[in-house]
Amino acid sequence: MDYEKILERISDVYQQSVRFYRPAGNEENESSKTRNLPNQLINNSYVPEIDGNYLLFFNEIYTNTTRKWLKNLLKKIAWPILKRQVYYNSAVRQLLYNLIQKSDEYSTRDKEVNKKFSQLEQKIDQLSQLKQKIDQLPRFEQKIEQLSQLEQKIDQLPQLQQKIEQISTELRTNSSVTNQPSSNEESKIASGLWFNEPIIVGYHENGEAYWAGTNERIFEKTFVLQSLARLYKSSNITVLDVGAAESLLSYELASFNYSVTAIDIRPIALFHPNLKFVKTDICNPVLPPASFDCVIALSTLEHIGLGWYGDETGESYDIKAVQQISLLLKPEGSFILTVPYGKKALTPVHRIYNQESLQKLIQDFKIVQISYGVRKDDFTWTITENELEASEKEHNPNNYLPGAVAMLVCKKNIV
């Protein structure tokens, strides 16, 4: 072992200790420090904590040396330092304890802060979700409107079914007519654009269309238009069309610049600036009295009260409807109507009137003009003033089409 280096190292440790821990007012020189090294270290009460590496170094020397004078020297140097080390370790522990306590307090506070931040983030997320729901409100309103429209279409399904059954019945004019309409006809029915026109179109099994027959409408609308032109020199009148669904009459009158109100228990599909539609039963008093110059009932009264078109069933509902029409007409108003005529009958679709039942139907009116349409065959009709010829006609039992039709212009009976 190089003892000179050991002594030099011990001297360095001592000098460092004295430089920092010398009592105040001590003016001794360096040579005195070297000579009295052990006593100064023992008596110095200001020696603080020393680097632990020095103590390990001293211990290594003390363990390995065999020289007594060196061991004694190390005891006198290392022991005071060790005592001071214990004291300052206690101070350090107290300081560390205080730091740990403060750290715990800060940690607790940080946890609370973090918890509040977490709650705040949750509230922000909830607000974000609420904003998303608010943004979705317009889509929900569209869905509700679509559901409302769907409900209306569902409500119309029974009426559409009745229309299909009616068309099927009218097309069964003979054994060669199929009761299945084409896809175009079905589309018209579904959209409310099927109209009861005078030319009946039938379909073969292969889908080929053909002329199946001609109904009474071949001259009913012509009779109405001619009567209006004869009764009124101007189109500046108010007209009520009763039973407007499946008929082009309201649209044609509106196109001729008449002011038209259409009424039916079924909706209509087309509109015109001169056309107003009221969805109701004519038997219900929903319109103001004395509102119209002219009321038209084209092949309508015979159906009222039978339930074929989804209307309320009841006996003499056709007479009740005419009574309401009389109330809606102005005192000098005109009533134009057409009804099936011939041998009296009641079918699932309509009534067939004879002279007696027709007179009872219009008992509140005076007949101004009456004409009859008479079927000659499936395709041909003629007009006559001969009531007897029309009264002998019977309806077709297969499709219920009438053999004749009565067309009347009436005025209110003024009491």
Image: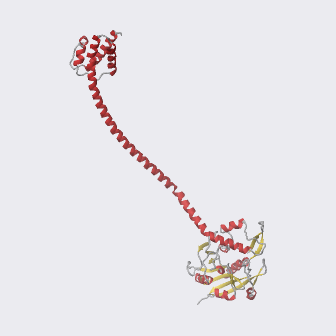
Asked whether residue 129 is in view, the answer is yes
Residue 389 or 70: which is nearer the viewer? 70
Q: Where 117 sits versus 58, above or below?
A: below
Residue at the limit of the structure toward the left, as seen here: 25
Please report the residue visible at 27 percent of the width from the left and 13 percent of the height from the top. 72
**In the image, residue 28 lies at what x, y percent?**
22, 14
> Looking at the rendering, which quadrant does residue 162 occupy?
bottom right
Q: Is residue 344 left or right of residue 90?
A: right
- Observer-nearest of 131 and 23: 23
Residue 207 position (above or below residue 299): above
In this picture, residue 306 sits left or right of residue 42: right
Q: Foreground: 142 or 206?
A: 206
- Residue 272 visible to an observer of this rendering: no
Which residue is located at x 31 percent, y 31 percent?
A: 96
Query: Residue 340 placed where, x, y %?
Result: 70, 82
Residue 384, image quadrant: bottom right
Q: Residue 260: image x %, image y %?
A: 62, 75
Quadrant of the drawing holding the C terminus: bottom right
Q: Looking at the figure, which quarter contains the N terminus?
A: top left
Question: x, y (%) of residue 376?
Answer: 78, 81
